[in-house]
Image (cartoon, helix red, strand yellow):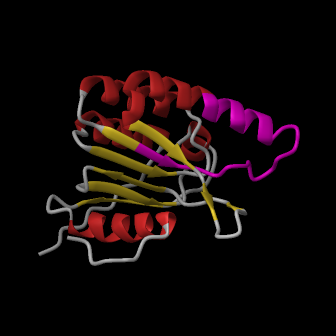
Amino acid sequence: MTEVALQRTTAETFARAYTRAFARARKLIYVEDQYFWSDVVAGTLADALRREPDLQVIAVVPRYAEDEGRFGGPPMHYGQRLAYDLLREAGGDRFSMFDLENDAGTPIYVHAKVCIVDDEWMTIGSDNLNLRSWSHDSELTCAVVDPDGELHRRLRTPLWAEHSACPRTTPG
């Protein structure tokens, strides 16, 4: 029997859900996000890396901002650099940030919003990991808890295979 719970969310409930999931993480936090630059999110992830010596954090982000103009590109690059530096300081090589490109070397714009924690908790939807997304934009995101991790592995494994140009195999 599958249990489904629906909840109306606010900025606080989004932030609380991610904070709790990151605080419980022991092995892996995998994030694909269009705007990986929130100091709150980076700080929470850094705390988790400091607390858990075996924790790995992997972030997949766009190489360039959606709007590379004066007001779009520089703030995004600066914010991502701050987040990267904080997480690298906290976790060393246990933190990795990647962007994607096609076979011709053209950057692929990451617009996904996926977060998977220990293959037990995940979100997928339209919210970015930042306060603006949680407080000013109209977003729809689904959080899924699966203690067996089946659904999470079935999402994460093909994503990794696609991103790394590896053959797709059945998750196991």
Q: Picture coordinates of residue 168 (x, y %)?
A: 38, 77
Q: Residue furthest right?
A: 70
Q: Is residue 97 left or right of residue 66?
A: left
Which span of residues is magenta-colored? Answer: 58-81
Q: Picture coordinates of residue 120 (x, y %)?
A: 23, 55
Compared to residue 116, the image places residue 40 above or below, namely above
Count the marks: how many? Answer: 0
Residue at the image position 24 percent from the left and 29 percent from the top: 52
Compared to residue 97, the image places residue 125 above or below, namely below
Q: Residue furthest left?
A: 1
Q: Nearer the viewer, residue 67 or 126?
A: 67
Q: Is residue 30 left or right of residue 171?
A: right
Compared to residue 72, the image places residue 157 above or below, namely below
Q: Nearer the viewer, residue 62 or 103?
A: 103
Q: Picture coordinates of residue 38 (x, y %)?
A: 56, 34
Indicate the quadrant where residue 167 lies.
Answer: bottom left
Residue at the image position 26 percent from the left and 24 percent from the top: 51
Q: Is residue 72 left or right of residue 24?
A: right
